[in-house]
Every structure is written in structure tokens, then in C-alpha cells.
Image: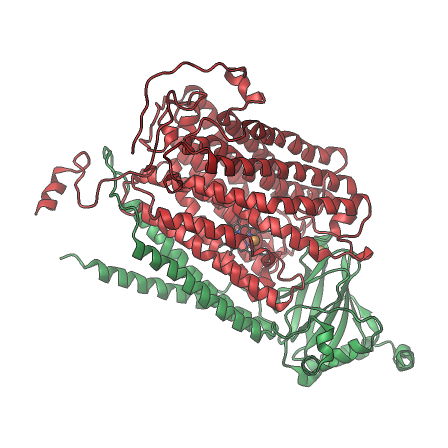
Chain colours: A red, B green
Amino acid sequence: MTLSLPPQTSHPSNLQPEGWLRYLSFSLDHKVIGLQYLVTAFFFYLVGGALAGMIRVELLSPISDFMPRETYNEVLTLHGTVMIFLWIVPVVNGGFGNYLIPFYVGARDMAFPRLNAVAFWLIPPAGFLLIASYFIAGAAQSGWTAYPPLSLTTPAAGQVVWILSVLLLGGSSIFGGINFIATVLKMRRPGLGMMQLPMYCWAMLGTSILVVLATPVLAGTLVLLSFDIIAHTGFFNPALGGNAVVYQHLFWFYSHPAVYIMVLPAFGLVSEILPVHARKPLFGYTTMVYSILGIVFLGLIVWAHHMFTSATPPWMRLFFTIATAFIAVPTGIKFFNWLATLWGGKIALNSAMLFSCAFIVHFVFGGITGVALAQVPFDIHVHDTYFVVGHFHYIVYGGTVFVVFGSIYHWFPKFTGRMLNEPLGRLHFLLTFIGFNLCFAPQHWLGLNGMPRRVAEYDPQFTLLNQLSSVGALLMAISTLPFLVNVVWSALAGQVAGDNPWNALTPEWLTSSPPPVENWKGPAPLVTHPYGYGVPEGQIDLKAVSGLEIWSEGR
Amino acid sequence: MPIPSAIVTLVLGMILVLSGLWVGQNVNLLPAAASTNAPLYDELFAVLFTIGTILFLGIVGLLIFSLVRFRRRDGDLGDGVAVEGNLQLEIFWTAIPAIVVLFVGIYSYDIYDRMGGMIPLADPHAMHGSMGSAVMPASVEELVTQDVEPRLWGGIGSPGGTEAGLLPVEVTALQFAFLFHYPEGDFTSGELHVKAGQTVELRMEARDVIHAFWVPQFRLKQDVIPGQPTVLTFTPTLPGQYPIICAELCGPYHGGMRSTVVVHEPEAFDSWLASNRPATLALTAPLATG
Ligand code: HEM
Ligand SMILES: [Cu+2]
Ligand SMILES: [Cu+2]
């Protein structure tokens, strides 16, 4: 690792507000925007969580008794939309991406700072529009997938607002994607090669390619859908000669890549966290890069696995089965590489590490059920049941959300200059881990045995497991309390972290905490070995070993 | 003397495989198997469950072992060993998932084929040819005689059981019910009644929005999409009553859109059919249909 940090240059003049007001302004600073994304997304996470809580309360009993049936469908539509478009996508892309990518490429800011600020400021109005629709005209009722003809026949106002809101969020996502691609490809500090970048850059590059290729398709589709609703065109309306299945193809052409938009950045974040806390280089850098690219490519050609029961012809079912199952290969490489990164390390079992390892467990589980779902004969039975609900929550919550929490424990010292409290962090982990598994593991059995998804009432034989699942959800809700207390308290009075509490090598740690506006005083460091941890094989680390070990080595 | 690690690994691997096999064979997570599809499905499920258990336990075991064995001891500020990769290892664990996935894919294709998934029934134009009519004689005649020639969209077919003849039932899915019309008796029922061992051909149509016909005990699901008449065939085997569940969000009462399929013993079915056939209509029906 080479770095040069000459002391103190003059502070550049700037017209931006100072202090905490920055966070409410149209700031162009990527770090401010990153934190704006994080906090906003977390707010929507709490909203989406409250909606999930309402769903789980309704499902405590097998009859529809907690809220009107229409409201239930509004709630489940809002829950899915909020969690995907306002929490997961913004937090792992906009949040951590904006904060970290300029550091990693050795830049002072993103390639297009203004576009970046615009991308962020599209989110709050879109989010409030979506939620306001519930209070004004009634929210959309057709699920986050908005399949026509249902979305054409449910009340139009809510559906149109939903479309508008998702279009704004999609636009925000595309702006962000363009910005990340440009930053990673064009803003690299001279001397920094692509294969020397921290893995998160590759993950964001792959994600952004998916965003830029797939999101416009969703936008176009939703515009057509809104024509069908407002102008009574017949693109997707069978009654007017349209075709409802075409919508599904177009929708999933975006929405399968979208699941990778939600999880690839998490893969990148884990790749940053594990080496630091295991004190070992990231294992198999090159294969990791190629597997990301492989996932991006395969992710674009598997969408119809969501449509195996939509009267798809046999050849199409076969093709999409094979393509989907093969995603397990690049994905598997990444998991084995992470395990090899841990192997032989000196692993600190702190909150960041615990959340990351739980991610591995959950994702492996969700990946296994995913490969099963890819098999047409298997999927025919469990499609649109709670089995699928279990599958994707293991991936999206057990995977991505766990990584988000791990990342907050990891980077909080950089964001604020203070450490998060470790015992509270472990309590948070324990509650989330137990609550999550209690909530979602039983759902697989429910799906296999006859409980469809998106229902407010169900066969009474499923009551017990649903109540168990609701208890898990309650635990998950409770688990956010120690987290929130921890964040607020630590930000104000936590232990001072110093510049580099983890002894990490990536460039965001080679500056003060929190970093100055220009990221580094003086020239940006050139980090060519972001994972250069560890002692060479066979050499004894004198700082670490005890006398006994030296003795036994020497024998 | 310490046991060589190669032996330990071998033994652990064998225990892992055996426990996966045991779980796959002995843990039953599925409801009753009541159609010819179901045993095939359960066979596939057992295989996937076995492989999944082995992989999951293996990976989680490895993870937990690493976390315990390589945890940082108090006061140890050193680093681990600087291994940056190992090409052979990486090729090895690219190959493992590839082989597993390939095996699973071929196997599930075989299951799919045995379920009748590869029978071409999507295109009525193909059915005019000899190949199509060889496969589904009864339905072709029905189709060709209709004025509007609907494009057919198939679910998984279910060959076999044809010696008892095909029982055609016209299914209409609408918010929020399934209606079953028996052309043989010219009456409509809110429940589906079928005969054990006789292949049923559901000709399904949706009136308003997309619904899905699902019978968990048959391991069978098919979306019913407006504008796309769909044919689904299956052969029930085990007499009993099973739920029919709508599996596609179709509006506020989606959760209540359920019905029952009754699989009768052959004689019981015939008497059920006779008791439902409207007496007068039964006489006039041949005249009406010409
Ligand atoms: C090994 C990798 C994976 C495979 C093979 C796989 C396979 C599948 C399949 C076949 C379905 C359709 C099930 C059905 O509706 O019948 C599905 C649904 C889903 N998967 Fe995955 N999956 C994988 C990983 C992921 C990842 C990484 C994510 C997200 C980060 C994800 C999120 C979802 C979601 C959200 C759905 C449900 C969408 C809906 O119907 O609302 N999956 N997956
Ligand atoms: Cu998908
Ligand atoms: Cu329904």
C-alpha cells in the first residue's frame, strides 16, 4: 500500500450551509447525500415496518377481522413498494454508494454532484406522495407487482399515484446509476487500476449497469399502464384486445434484475467488512469480479421464472429454469470465497461481523430455496404462496437488511467519529436474528401446505404457525429499539473512534472521522492493495503469538 | 496422536451426506398426495431437500467452525495469514455448484417430462396436424368444432389414465368464485367433483382479472388469465376432499376465493353425476347441441 498524506492545505471556500443544516439542504457533498439517503431510507423502513406489523396483526386470526379487506390490500401494496423502492434500493445504492464510492476511487466527489442531489431529492416527495395517497384517495390495491387487469379495475386514483411515485423513484435510481458508472470508470485517481478497486466498486458498477438497462423498461411499462387506466387504451387490457401477460414480461424484465439491484451492493459491502474484521485479504479477488459480472449478465435473462404458471410455453419454462439455476454458480463462488476469507483469520466477533455472518446463513438458505423455485415442476406448486414470501424475505431481509445493519456498525465511526455501543449492538443482533427466523422460517411450510400469499383470511389449520410468525415480527419490531437508542446515544456521547478504529486499509479510513468536505486534506491516497492484511504464510507474527507457539513452531 | 485431518474431513463429509439423505427421506413437509403428479413432485422435493440440507448444513457448519476456531483472542492484535486466493480451490468450488445445478436441472426436466409438461398443447395450429391429435384426441374434436378457435395455453398436462376417458369440465373464474360446468350433464356446480383415476380436462376462462387455480394436494397450479382460454389436465388418484385455492391476488375477497374438489370413488362419482343432471335438460340436451 502506498499513501501520501501531506499536512493541511487551505480550506476551500464553499457556499453550502454548514453544520447540521447541510443535511436539510440541496448539498452537493457526496457524504452529506449519502447520509441523507441513509436517514430518509431508514425513516421509510420504519413506515414499511409499521405496515408489516399491520399485516401480521391481521394474520393473527384466520378470519379478516382487523381491517377492511380493501385496506388490507392497500397495506400490503404499500408495504412492498415502500420496502423495495424507498428502503432497500435507496439505502444500499444511494446511501452507502454515495458515501463510499468517491473514497474508493480516490475522488473528492461523485462525477455529477448536482445530478446526485437531484436524485436524492426526488425520493422524499415520491415517498410522501405514495403514503399520502392512502389518506387522500386510498392507496393502490394491486400489490407491488400491479398486474393488470386487476390494477385497471381497482380504484384508479390510488393506482395512478402509485405509478407516479414509482416513476419518480425509478428516475432517481437511474440518475444514481449513471452517476456511479461515470464515477467508477472516469473519476479514478491516476494510477488506480480497475482491478485494484475495493470490491464494493465492482458491485456498484454491476448494479448500476442493471439499473440503467432495466429501470427504463419498468418506466415505459408503467407509463403504458397509466394510459390504460387514464385514457382507456388497451395495451394490457384483454377486454380491449390487449395482453395481460406482456405486462408481466415487461415488469419482471425490470423486477428480477431489481432483486440483484437490492443484493449486489450488499455483496459488495460484505466484501469490505469481512476482511477488516477477519484481518485477512479478501479471498479470490479476480473470481469475485467475474462472478459479479456473471450475475449481472445472467440476471438479465431469467425474468420469466416469475411466470411459470402464466401459461408460458414449455420451451420458455425450460430456458428460464436453466438460466435461473445457473445464477447459483457465480453466487456460490462468492460465498465460498467469503468463507475462505474467514478461514484462518483472526475474527473479531463484533456486531458488524455477526450481522455479516448471519447474512451468509440466510442468503445460503434463500439461495437454496431459490434454486428449488427455479425448477418448473417444483415452482408450479408453490408459486404465489407463502413459500415464495419466505424465500424472498430470507434474501432481502435476512440478506440485504442484515448487511445494512452490519454496515452501519462498521461505518458509523467514520460517519460520526464515534463508536456504536457494542453490547447494545449484540442485543440488537440477537433480537433481530431470532425474530427474523421465527417470522419467516415457518412461512415455507405454510406455503407448501396450502397458504397462498396476499390473503387476509386463511384456513384455520394454519393459525398456530401464523401466530408464531407474528411473534417473530414483534421481536423484529422490538429489535429496532436498542438500535435506535444506540445510534442516537452514540452519535452524541459514544466513545470517540479516532480516524481508523478498525485498522482498515481502504481509503475512507485514511482521513479524519468524520472526513472533511474534500475527503482528504491534501492529495488523495493511492491505495493499490485495499485488502493487504495479514502476515505472509509461514511467517510468525511476533506481535501476536505467545511464547509457547514460537516454541512449538520451532520444534 | 492426533487424527489426520483428511480422515476427519472424510468422516464429517459422510455424516453430512447421510444426514442429508435421512432428512430428505424422513422429514415430510408436504400435504397428502392426491394426483398422479403428486408422487413425482414429492420425489423431486425429496431430492432437492436432500441436496439443500447437505449444502446448508455444510456451509453453516463451516461458518460456525471458522467463527469459533479463528476468533480473535483477547489482546491479540495480529493479522491472519495473507492468502489472497487459490486458483485450484476456486475452480473446485465453481465446479461443485455447476455440477449440482446441472444434475438438478436434468433431473427436474425428467420429472417435468413425466408430469406431461412437454406435451405440446399450446398451439391449436399444431393440433390440426397428426401429432397433436394423437396426443389429445378428445379435446381436439371439441376445439375444431367450435366457431372461435381459441388459442390454448397449457399448464402441465397429465397423460395416462385415458383408458377411463377424459372428463371435461369448463371452469369459469370470476371475482370471487370458481364455477364448474359439466358439459356431459349440462349443469353448473360450485364444487369440482371428479372420479379417482379418470383424467380431468379443465377448460378454464377468467371473466375479469387474473385468478389462479391451485390444489395443493394435486401439486398443481395454473393461472387463469382473461382473454386466454387455458387447458389443464390432471388425474386425481386419492379419494377425498381437498381445497381449491385462488393463488393470484384478484381483489379484496381474494383470500376467500376458495372452493372444494371432491375426488370420488368411481361408482360414487357416477351417482353424483346422475343426481345432478337435470332430468328435463338431459332429454333436451342432445337436441340443443345438435
Ligand atoms: C440463487 C439465486 C436465486 C434464485 C435461483 C431465485 C429464484 C427465484 C424464483 C424462481 C422466484 C419465483 C418464485 C415464484 O414466484 O414462484 C423468486 C422470487 C423472488 N425472489 Fe428469488 N431467487 C434467487 C435470489 C434472489 C435474490 C438475490 C433476491 C433479492 C435480493 C430474490 C428476490 C426475490 C423476490 C423479491 C421474489 C418474489 C417476487 C414476487 O413475486 O413478489 N431472489 N426467486
Ligand atoms: Cu427473479
Ligand atoms: Cu384470487
* Quadrant position of the N terminus of chain A in the picture: top left
**Picture coordinates of residue A59, whole percent (x, y):** 63, 47
Is B182 placed above or below A307 here? below
Picture quadrant where residue A347 is located: top left
**Picture coordinates of residue A33, whole percent (x, y):** 53, 27
Give the side of residue A108 with respect to residue A212, left or right. Answer: left
Along the line of sight, the residue nearer the viewer: A468 or A230: A230
Q: Assign ligand 3 to one image quadrant.
A: bottom right
Q: Is residue A342 visible?
A: yes
Picture residue at 50% right of the left edge, 48% below the top? A395
Q: Is residue A62 visible?
A: no
In the image as oriented, which residue stretches furthest toward the front? A190
Along the line of sight, the residue nearer the viewer: A122 or A62: A122
**Picture coordinates of residue A105, whole percent (x, y):** 42, 33
Along the line of sight, the residue nearer the viewer: B25 or A350: A350
Give the side of residue A295 with respect to residue A346, left or right. Answer: right
**Picture coordinates of residue A338, whole percent (x, y):** 36, 47
Is A279 placed above or below A24 here? below
How many discs mark residues in the rendered view?
Answer: 0
In the image as oriented, which residue stretches furthest toward the left? A555
Along the line of sight, the residue nearer the viewer: A276 or A448: A276
Picture quadrant where residue B164 is located: bottom right
